[in-house]
Image (cartoon, rainbow, N blue to C red):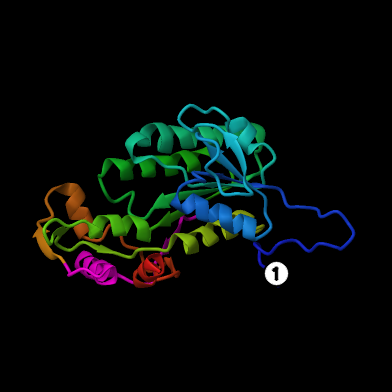
């Protein structure tokens, strides 16, 4: 049986009938770029909403626009089969993640009411008082309140983010928090799941779906792996207590997947090795 992401068959000598495009917001970011590449590999036209033209993957169609203002949204959603909503901005989470998601839903309701919205969120966003997480929870509310066809996808931290968190050290010392663990996920694998959900013709699942990497590692284990692959000595970790509500929730595992999560993709060590190669 053909997969949703398999390209349509073409008959030699006849013009190919292509699928309707899929819009990717945040299509120049880490996950969005991988989603665009997966669409193009699958023979699906990809449209990228971008504030800075010229940065999208070769082969993708760009539309200049901005979720923070709503500019370009009507043109971006017009005629698309689905929207993979990866755009996010921790520094402007209210304007982009919350209000921008509401603007996107409104544009879809007006210009393309049958298109499915695949909304990327974060595991633990409802369980942590971190302002950015609160914004992600509010964005989910905007999606569900819109009443439109949608899938909410909650994911763990991608390898690139975890690497930035654990690779920093000064004079051989690193800083960590007691109890902090991660289930880092490969952005490429996550992107294929987003594309499959966008192209699936079955009714959209109602409860949010969780995706995570295949392993659970402490911050210390991740720091040692990172240093080893980089050819450095493992840092001596200064363990800080989990002070405050935000840190306590991380230490308690609010960022970790539940038993129902779909897990897969490259491990952190595999990603590190490939990155170094």
Write down the region rendered in magenta: 206-234
Q: Is residue 236 above or below residue 126?
A: below
Left or right placement of residue 103 versus residue 213 in this view: right
The residue at the point 28 percent across, 40 percent down is 131
Q: Is residue 203 visible?
A: no
Residue 135's place in the image compared with 209, above or below, is above
**SS state under label 1:** loop
The residue located at (51%, 51%) in the rendering is 33
Q: Position of residue 200 (x, y in %)?
A: 63, 58
How packed mark 1 is, by other alpha carbons closer than 10 Å (few <14, some 14-19, many 20 or more), is few
| Residue 4 pos. (x, y %) | 66, 62
The front one of 241 and 11 is 11
The residue identified by callout 1 is: 2
Q: Quadrant of residue 223?
A: bottom left
Q: Which quadrant would the N terminus be assigned to in this image?
A: bottom right
Position of the C terminus by quadrant: bottom left
Spot occupied by residue 43 in the image (x, y as percentages of width and height): 69, 58
Q: Is residue 63 magenta?
A: no
Q: Which residue does the image show at 33% across and 55% down from the upper left?
A: 161
Above or below — where is 97 with respect to 10? above
Say if the magenta span includes residue 217.
yes
Q: Is residue 176 visible?
A: yes
- State the residue in front, 26 or 180: 26
């Amino acid at each position: 049986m053909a997969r949703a992401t398999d390209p349509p068959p073409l008959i030699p000598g006849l013009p190919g009938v292509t699928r309707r495009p899929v819009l990717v917001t945040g299509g120049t970011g880490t996950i969005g770029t991988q989603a665009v590449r997966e669409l193009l590999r699958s023979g699906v036209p990809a449209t990228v909403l971008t504030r800075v033209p010229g940065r999208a993957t070769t082969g993708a169609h760009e539309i200049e626009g901005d979720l923070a203002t709503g500019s370009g949204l009507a043109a971006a959603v017009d005629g698309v089969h689905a929207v993979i909503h990866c755009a996010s901005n921790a520094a402007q989470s209210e304007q982009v993640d919350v209000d921008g998601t509401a603007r996107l839903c409104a544009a879809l309701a007006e210009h393309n009411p049958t298109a499915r919205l695949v909304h990327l969120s974060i595991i633990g966003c409802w369980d942590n008082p971190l302002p950015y997480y609160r914004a992600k929870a509010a964005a989910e509310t905007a999606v569900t309140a819109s009443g439109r066809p949608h899938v909410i996808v909650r994911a763990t931290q991608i390898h690139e983010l975890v690497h930035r968190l654990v690779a920093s050290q000064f004079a051989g010392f690193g800083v960590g928090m007691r109890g902090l663990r991660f289930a880092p996920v490969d952005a490429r694998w996550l992107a294929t799941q987003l594309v499959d959900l966008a192209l699936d013709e079955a009714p959209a699942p109602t409860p949010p779906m969780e995706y995570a990497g295949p392993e659970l590692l402490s911050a210390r284990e991740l720091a040692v792996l990172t240093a080893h692959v980089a050819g450095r000595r493992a840092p001596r970790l200064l363990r800080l207590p989990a002070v405050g509500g935000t840190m306590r929730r991380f230490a308690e595992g609010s960022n970790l997947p539940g038993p129902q999560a779909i897990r897969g993709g490259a491990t952190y060590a595999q990603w590190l090795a490939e990155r170094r190669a």
